[in-house]
Image (spheres, rainbow, N blue to C red):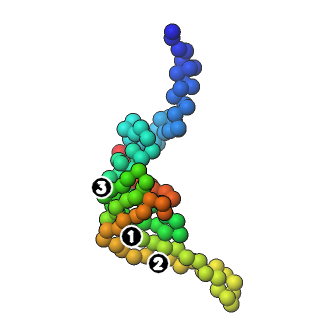
Amino acid sequence: GSTSTNDNKQQQTSCPFHCYYYNTAFQPLKSLFHKMEEPLDLIRLSIDERVYVKCRGNRELRGRLHAYDQHLNMILGEVEETVTSTEIDEETDEEIVKKQTRKVGMLFVRGDIVVLVSPPLRTG
């Protein structure tokens, strides 16, 4: 049996990334998504590239991804770690936001603290 054009269009738009295929601003991502079959593929394609990792405890990491596993345990190199904390000024009752940053040569990140992993920006 043959399928109508509307059926084919419906199947295309059910893809979770359909918005990227119809927006020319995201054309570089189209070829990237053809290489992905599961969510961890996005991380696999980021090996040896700089990634952003948001962690529990108001901790952010930026570094080169060397290795990862299915639990999101990661080895990052050339890491910049930022910890954000807030305090209340007792005199003015204002919230004071403090950011502490440190550089680490190599870091093991345990997967259960990972909230988000952002791959590098791909422009072409």
Mark 1: few/some/many CA within 10 Å (<14, 14-19, 20+): some
Estimate the spatial distance between the alpha carbons at disc 1 and disc 3, rounded to whole Å: 16 Å
Is tag 3's residue or tag 2's residue first in the polypeptide sequence? Answer: 3
Q: Position of residue 123 (x, y in %)?
A: 38, 48
Q: In the figure, is residue 117 to the left or right of 124?
A: right
Residue at 36 percent across and 74 percent down: it is 103
| SS under mark 1 | strand
Image mark for residue 48: 3
Question: The residue under label 2 is which amino acid type?
Answer: Gln
Compared across the picture, whether 6 is left or right of 60 comes to right
* Mark with earlier residue (2, 1): 1
Give the x, y percent position of residue 79. Answer: 36, 68
Q: Tell me whether the residue at label 3 lies in contact with that at label 2, contact meaning CB atoms closer than 8 angstroms.
A: no
Q: Mark 1 points at which residue?
A: 80
Q: Residue at x 42, y 47 (%)?
A: 40
* Residue 50 visible at all: no
Asked whether 30 or 111 is in front, the reply is 111
Indicate the amino acid at tag 3: Asp
Residue 78 as seen in the image, left or right of residue 22: left
- Mark 3 crowdedness (10 Å alpha carbons): few <14, some 14-19, many ≥20: some
Q: How far apart are marks 2 and 1 (CA)?
A: 10 Å
- When asked about the image quadrant of residue 104, the answer is bottom left
| Along the line of sight, the residue nearer the viewer: 39 or 82 | 39
What mark, if any, has residue 100 been given in the picture?
2
The disc, 1 or 3, on the residue closer to the chain's N-terminal end is 3
Per the image, label 3 sits on a secondary structure element best described as: loop
Residue type, label 1: Glu
Q: In which quarter of the image is residue 82?
A: bottom left
The Cα–Cα distance between marks 3 and 2, rounded to whole angstroms, is 26 Å
In the image, taking residue 91 as reference, residue 23 lies left or right, namely left
Instruction: Pinpoint residue 109: horizontal percent, then vertical percent.
Output: 40, 64
